[in-house]
């Protein structure tokens, strides 16, 4: 199993007019900092507020007419994408989540007409219900990252960036289960083999990073993070995203919560963009001096579905409590 440039071009046709063509805009601040054109791909402007609509649309469109419905485990954005795509096809969708998922995300998914099952306090417990729906009710499970149609859908971001700016030399990609990074890297490197693709995760519970280090998928403990969309495992039975990330990523960089906090402030104050912690890791890694990109460089602002109370605390420089960890508050000051 693999995902090819042809698969990604096919996905682009499937999602056209619904989930494509987000703006690629310059960040004057980051361009001045790096001395290179620094571009932001604004997936926060997607109809569901995140890029996951691309993969979900492509995966749901690939299903035959006799499918009883679709199901998935999700902490939010993928579930929202699957719910949106299923609604477009008039198909039943059941999104399984743990009781840790915030009510606002649950309400967003229900508003799209999907059923929500809340089970247990972990992704693993929610998975049991998804497995039951597949076994007993004939529903089809759509993985958030380990599915060829999902990866091809996310890869359309790479096509759009390279079409808009063929001179791109470096792509900075937020990294969790690796569907996004695998898709973008496959598209970009098929078009321009010399382009560098760097994945970025938080430094606690970085499942893909730990798995790449170990040479095989491993389990990691899950921690609360400002980059909550980057949490969770890659699956010990990972079929595709691990192998693709191992083949295609030039490097993986890890960030502290303080560095992510500063990245969120910077994107807000300098570019006036409201985005999740998961989205700012590309510019945060550059600001932290952990990546010195060769330009032109593009990073994907992956989504905007964040807790606004927490966001307000961050942009006003207050402490943020994450489980048993406190991220110390700090008023925004542009790093020099
Ligand atoms: C899912 C997600 C990611 C990471 O994507 P993967 O394919 O799991 O690596 C990054 N940012 C946001 C906002 C997401 O929802």
Image (cartoon, rainbow, N blue to C red):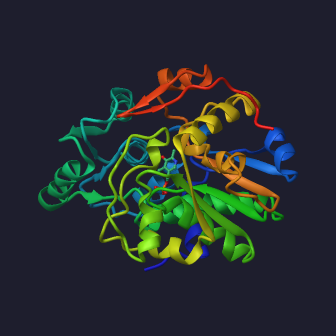
Depth order, front residue of 111/43: 43
Query: Does residue 13 appear in the picture of this structure?
Result: no
Q: In the figure, 228 relative to 58: above or below?
A: above
Depth order, front residue of 251/326: 326
Residue extending farthest to the left is 136
**Which corner quadrant holds the N terminus?**
bottom left
The percent position of residue 202, horizontal first and vertical second, equals 50, 50
Q: In the figure, 202 relative to 6: above or below?
A: above
Query: Does residue 44 appear in the picture of this structure?
Result: yes
Q: How many marks?
A: 0
**Residue 160 found in image quarter:** bottom right
Depth order, front residue of 85/275: 275
**Which corner quadrant holds the C terminus?**
top right
Q: Residue at x 62, y 26 (%)?
A: 330
The percent position of residue 15, horizontal first and vertical second, equals 55, 54
Q: Residue at x 46, y 49 (%)?
A: 230
Q: Residue at x 43, y 48 (%)?
A: 85
Q: Residue at x 37, y 30 (%)?
A: 111
The percent position of residue 242, horizontal first and vertical second, equals 44, 71
The percent position of residue 163, horizontal first and vertical second, equals 76, 62
Q: Is residue 225 left or right of residue 272?
A: left
């Amino acid at each position: 199993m693999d995902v090819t440039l042809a698969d990604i071009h096919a996905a682009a046709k499937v999602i056209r007019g619904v989930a494509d063509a987000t703006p690629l805009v310059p960040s004057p601040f980051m361009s001045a900092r790096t001395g290179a054109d620094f571009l932001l791909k604004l997936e926060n402007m997607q109809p569901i507020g995140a890029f996951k609509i691309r993969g979900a649309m492509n995966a749901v469109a690939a299903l035959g007419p006799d499918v009883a419905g679709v199901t998935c485990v999700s902490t939010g954005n993928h579930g929202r994408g699957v719910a949106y795509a299923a609604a477009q096809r008039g198909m039943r969708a059941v999104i399984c989540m743990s009781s840790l998922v915030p009510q606002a995300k649950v309400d967003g998914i229900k508003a799209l007409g999907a059923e929500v099952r809340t089970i247990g306090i972990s992704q693993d417990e929610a998975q049991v219900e998804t497995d039951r729906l597949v076994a007993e009710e004939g529903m089809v499970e759509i993985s958030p990252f380990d599915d060829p149609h999902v990866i091809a859908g996310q890869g359309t971001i790479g096509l759009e960036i390279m079409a808009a700016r063929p001179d791109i030399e470096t792509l900075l990609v937020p990294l969790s289960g690796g569907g996004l990074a695998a898709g973008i890297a496959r598209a970009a490197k098929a078009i321009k083999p010399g382009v560098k693709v760097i994945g970025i995760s938080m430094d606690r519970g970085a499942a893909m990073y730990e798995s790449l280090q170990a040479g095989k998928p491993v389990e990691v403990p899950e921690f609360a993070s400002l980059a909550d969309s980057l949490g969770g495992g890659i699956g010990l039975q990972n079929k595709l995203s691990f192998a693709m990330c191992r083949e295609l990523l030039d490097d993986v960089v890890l960030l502290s919560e303080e560095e992510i906090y500063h990245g969120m402030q910077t994107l807000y104050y300098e570019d006036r963009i409201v985005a999740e912690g998961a989205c700012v890791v590309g510019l945060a890694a550059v600001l932290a001096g952990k990546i010195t990109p060769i330009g032109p460089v593009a990073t994907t602002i992956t989504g905007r579905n964040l807790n606004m109370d927490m966001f307000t605390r961050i942009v006003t420089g207050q402490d943020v409590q994450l489980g048993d960890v406190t991220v110390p508050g700090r008023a925004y000051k542009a790093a020099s």
